[in-house]
Amino acid sequence: MKHGSTNPPKLYRIGELSRLAGISPRTIDYYTGLGLLAPAKRSTGNYRLYDDETLDRIRRIEQMKAQKLSLEEIRDKFAAFNRISHDEHVSRKLAELQSQLTQLERGVKELEPVLDQMKPQQVKRLFRAITPQTAACIEALLLLLGKNNLM
């Protein structure tokens, strides 16, 4: 729910949430059992009700799974983000940054064989052609990946 909004948050039963998220109700139950999701509240008929933040969280879980993270690793990341801030917006931003960094790491790993075959002058020209921030980021990632002989 956005700050300053007067409308009550939209709540979904598990079937609706499942359709919106593109995953089965069984998967939602599994994620809930693992502590990755929690219902926002219960209806008078004792149905679990989920909100839009839960839908966003499912999308983040699916993105992280696509990046080959295990559900345990995803749970650990969410727990770490929650220790930093209980604000869902902050947690979402941290997860997005983590996702972007993971994609960047993959891109650099794919680039490694090409960089390894380049002559030192070619590497220098390449790094002059990109922004200093991009060059520094690639250099840092290569160092983290143990390839510190390219620069």
Image (cartoon, grey):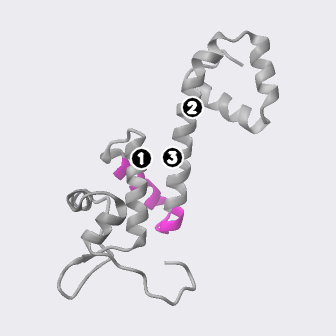
Position in image of residue 21 (x %, y %): 36, 61
The amino acid on which the numbered mark 3 sits, given as a three-letter code, is Ser
Position in image of residue 144 (x %, y %): 57, 28
- Decide if residue 90 is on the left or right side of residue 19: right
Q: Measure the alpha-carbon separation of dots 2 and 1.
A: 16 Å
- Decide if residue 109 is on the left or right side of residue 58: right
Q: Is 3 situated above or below 64?
A: below
Mark 3 or mark 2, which is nearer the start of the sequence? 3
Other residues around mark 2 within 10 Å, as few (<14) / some (14–19) / many (≥20): few
Q: Which mark is residue 107?
A: 2
In magenta, the rendered stretch is 74-90
Query: Do tag 3 and tag 1 residues touch (Cβ < 8 Å)?
Result: yes
Judged from the image, the secondary structure of the residue bearing numbered disc 3 is: helix
Q: According to the image, label 3 marks what residue? A: 99
Q: Measure the alpha-carbon separation of dots 3 and 1.
A: 7 Å
Taking the spot 38% from the left edge, 53% from the top edge, the residue there is 61
Mark 1 or mark 2, which is nearer the start of the sequence? 1
- Decide if residue 46 is on the left or right side of residue 64: left
Main secondary structure found in the magenta portion:
helix
100, 16: nearer the viewer: 16
Q: Which mark is residue 64?
A: 1
Taking the spot 23% from the left edge, 62% from the top edge, the residue there is 25
The amino acid on which the numbered mark 1 sits, given as a three-letter code, is Met
Other residues around mark 3 within 10 Å, as few (<14) / some (14–19) / many (≥20): some
What is the count of numbered marks?
3
